[in-house]
């Protein structure tokens, strides 16, 4: 008796040989990696090292000077921009309802998904105007807007900007327990958070002699993950306390 072998799906995203320069200085060169089901990828590096540009290439908004990006046919892709802005007059309710429509979510699933996503994100007044929310709550809404579409892959650019500690912990929980793959751009957060994410794969940018250097690091879960996460949370808590003094 022979078992039928399940056909292995191609990667959700395959990036091969990506290079980009602005003027004479190369931003990055010959970057290759793939994103498959369940992957959590942190693109980590200092400001100006090309992290957001790489993410824009994956979305298709920026073309590489060389190399190419292939996205698997039928992939549901959601993004969260670095700056979360909403048009005047739109409400929390209308933002998420529009996202359900864009994501072609079946009508029968919309009510439950709407309630579950906004409830877990902590929203209560759904008729509040999105543009009047604080920076942290606008970021939460932008993340909820992406999540409600049930993506196969979620791309986030500096998602902890403006989030308080509770918001960061909520986001970490979402990413750790989600079925979708994700790519997170961060100059610091992903480096500490990625330790607690399953199948973590980090693409790191480093500055050396004024130049950016990219490398790929594969780090499986270990017994030290919980301690690493607690140390990261303590550092962020101290930073938040310092900013509020």
Image (cartoon, helix red, strand yellow):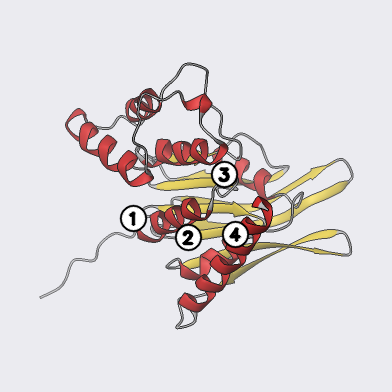
- Residue 201 visible (yes or no): no
Q: Secondary structure at mark 4?
A: helix
Residue 89 position (above or below residue 177): above
Q: In the image, what residue occupies the spot 34% across and 35% down?
A: 124
Q: Secondary structure at mark 3?
A: helix
Frontmost residue, 80 versus 210: 80
Between disc 3 and disc 1, whose residue precedes?
Answer: 3
Which residue is tagged 1? 179
Q: Position of residue 131 (x, y in %)?
A: 52, 25
Q: In the image, what residue occupies the spot 47% across and 16% down?
A: 89
Between disc 4 and disc 2, whose residue precedes?
Answer: 2
Residue 23 position (above or below residue 182): above
Horizontally, residue 4 falls left or right of residue 229, namely left
Give the Cα separation between the discs numbered 1 and 2: 10 Å
Q: In the image, what residue occupies the spot 70% across and 45% down?
A: 66
Which residue is tagged 3? 58
């Amino acid at each position: 008796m022979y078992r039928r072998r399940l056909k292995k799906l191609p990667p959700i995203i395959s990036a091969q040989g990506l290079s980009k320069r602005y003027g004479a200085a190369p931003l990055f060169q010959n970057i290759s990696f793939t994103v498959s089901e369940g992957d959590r990828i942190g693109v980590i590096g200092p400001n100006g090292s090309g992290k957001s540009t790489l993410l824009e290439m994956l979305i298709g908004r920026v073309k590489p000077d060389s190399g190419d990006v292939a996205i698997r046919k039928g992939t549901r892709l959601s993004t969260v921009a670095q700056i979360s802005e909403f048009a005047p007059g739109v409400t929390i309710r209308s933002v998420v309802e529009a996202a359900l429509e864009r994501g072609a979510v079946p009508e029968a699933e919309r009510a439950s998904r709407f309630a579950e996503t906004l409830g877990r994100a902590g929203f209560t007044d759904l008729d509040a105007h999105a543009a009047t929310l604080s920076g942290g709550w606008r970021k939460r809404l932008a993340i909820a807007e992406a999540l409600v579409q049930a993506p196969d892959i979620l791309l986030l650019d500096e998602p902890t900007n403006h989030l308080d500690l509770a918001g960061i912990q909520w986001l970490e929980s979402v990413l750790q327990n989600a079925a979708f793959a994700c790519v997170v751009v961060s100059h610091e957060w992903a480096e500490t958070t990625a330790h607690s994410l399953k199948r973590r794969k980090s693409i790191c940018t480093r500055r050396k002699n004024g130049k950016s250097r990219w490398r790929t690091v594969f780090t499986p879960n270990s017994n030290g993950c919980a301690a690493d996460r607690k140390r990261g949370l303590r550092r962020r808590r101290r930073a938040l306390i310092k900013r509020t003094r």
